[in-house]
Image (cartoon, grey):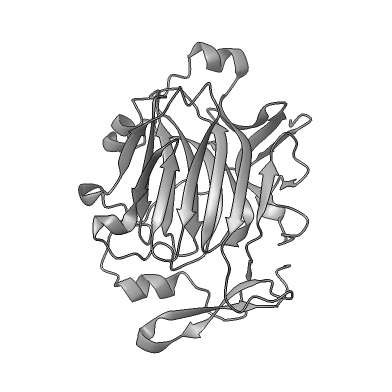
């Protein structure tokens, strides 16, 4: 049973990536949308603000019952369990919950995100702070396993995990990520993406790749998830530092593994045609060149 400052809900589908298949670029784009233009509510517009996580007042604790109130709540627990403490909110991983993920209730297109957090520190356990679009374009910070002296960043296009041609980077940080709060920044600009940890940065456009990652607005997500399971691919297990030890003394003492989220600051870049009545983004159909069209709207985001 959940205790004060704690919520627990059922695990959702744990598959994070879509493998390459015969679908074309545009087929993949189209497939994620509903059959009717009126089936889905707008994605709520970005709002510049700092969320602190010393309590759960602005966190909707059960994603399955969330009804779109982005004015009343800034975050929603999609799966797993959270515990508020004086140092921030712990995201919980145990043997039965499959990890924890929380998402922002608003989307960001262009702008900057600053995550302040302490990571997990155990082999097989991964902390992630990412943005994810509705078509599975992802830009991430990840902290795999027990390597607490480095941060990793990468991007994935349309959810396709192309490990043979990854553009990921790893960088050392100034002190252990699991025992010190660091700020990890994602800077989403119109012509580039930059991820910054301490004084390090990576620019996606310098990789001579197309820059589709910020074509689509995205939600912000923070998670802890179990990569080191017998059911995981061997490459994933190796990347995460091995199998999870459920007999670890920290786990036995607490009943869970965790990371700690202290704050998230969102600074929205100016959007053209935004008015005081703008509520969000909505998909309207297919435009020139068979490209899906997303526009701003003043329609309600409530279900």
Q: Is residue 119 above or below residue 163?
A: above
- Where is residue 218? Give x, y as percent: 52, 60
| 93 relative to 239 in the view: left or right | right
Question: Splitting the image into 4 quarters, where does residue 77 fall?
Answer: top right
Instruction: Name, please, the residue furthest toward the bottom.
Output: 288
Q: Is residue 137 visible?
A: yes
Question: Quick one: quadrant of the C terminus?
Answer: bottom right
Question: Splitting the image into 4 quarters, where does residue 138 fall?
Answer: bottom left
Q: Is residue 41 visible?
A: no
Instruction: Name, please, the residue furthest toward the left.
Output: 164
In terms of depth relative to the viewer, which is nearer, 228 or 178? 178
Count of numbered marks? 0
In terms of depth relative to the viewer, which is nearer, 86 or 269? 269
Instruction: Name, please, the residue furthest toward the front.
Output: 199
In terms of depth relative to the viewer, which is nearer, 101 or 208? 208
| 198 relative to 12 in the view: left or right | left
Q: Is residue 173 above or below residue 75?
A: above
- Where is residue 233? Give x, y as percent: 30, 38
Q: Residue at x 61, y 47 (%)?
A: 265
Question: Quick one: quadrant of the N terminus?
Answer: top right
Q: Residue at x 37, y 70 (%)?
A: 28
- Where is residue 244? Give x, y as percent: 42, 24
- Where is residue 241? Give x, y as percent: 34, 26
Q: Is residue 87 above or below residue 97?
A: above
């Amino acid at each position: 049973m959940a205790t004060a400052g704690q919520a627990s809900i059922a695990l959702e589908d744990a598959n994070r990536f879509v493998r390459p298949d015969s679908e074309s670029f545009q087929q993949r784009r189209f497939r994620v949308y509903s059959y009717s233009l009126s089936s889905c509510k707008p994605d709520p517009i970005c709002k510049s603000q700092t969320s602190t996580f010393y309590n759960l007042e602005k966190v909707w604790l059960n994603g399955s019952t969330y009804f779109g109130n982005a004015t009343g709540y800034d975050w929603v627990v999609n799966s797993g369990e959270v515990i508020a403490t004086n140092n921030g909110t712990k995201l919980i991983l145990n043997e039965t919950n499959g990890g924890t993920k929380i998402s922002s209730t608003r989307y960001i297109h262009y702008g900057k995100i600053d995550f302040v957090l302490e990571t997990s520190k155990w082999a097989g356990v991964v902390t992630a702070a990412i943005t994810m679009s509705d078509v599975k374009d992802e830009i991430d910070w990840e902290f795999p396993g027990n390597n607490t002296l480095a941060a990793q960043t990468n991007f994935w296009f349309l959810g396709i995990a192309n490990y043979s041609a990854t553009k990921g980077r790893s960088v050392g940080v100034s002190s252990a990520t699991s025992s010190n709060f660091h700020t990890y920044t994602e800077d989403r600009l119109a012509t580039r993406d930059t991820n910054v940890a301490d004084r390090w940065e990576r620019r996606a456009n310098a990789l001579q790749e197309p820059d589709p990652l910020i074509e689509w607005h995205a939600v912000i997500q923070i998670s802890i998830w179990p990569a080191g399971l017998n059911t995981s691919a061997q490459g994933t297990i190796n990347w995460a530092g091995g199998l999870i030890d459920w007999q670890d003394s920290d786990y036995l003492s607490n009943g869970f593994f965790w990371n700690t989220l202290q704050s998230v600051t969102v600074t929205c870049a100016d959007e053209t045609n935004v008015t005081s009545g703008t509520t969000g983004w909505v998909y309207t159909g297919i435009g020139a060149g068979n490209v899906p069209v997303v526009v701003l709207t003043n329609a309600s985001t409530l279900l």
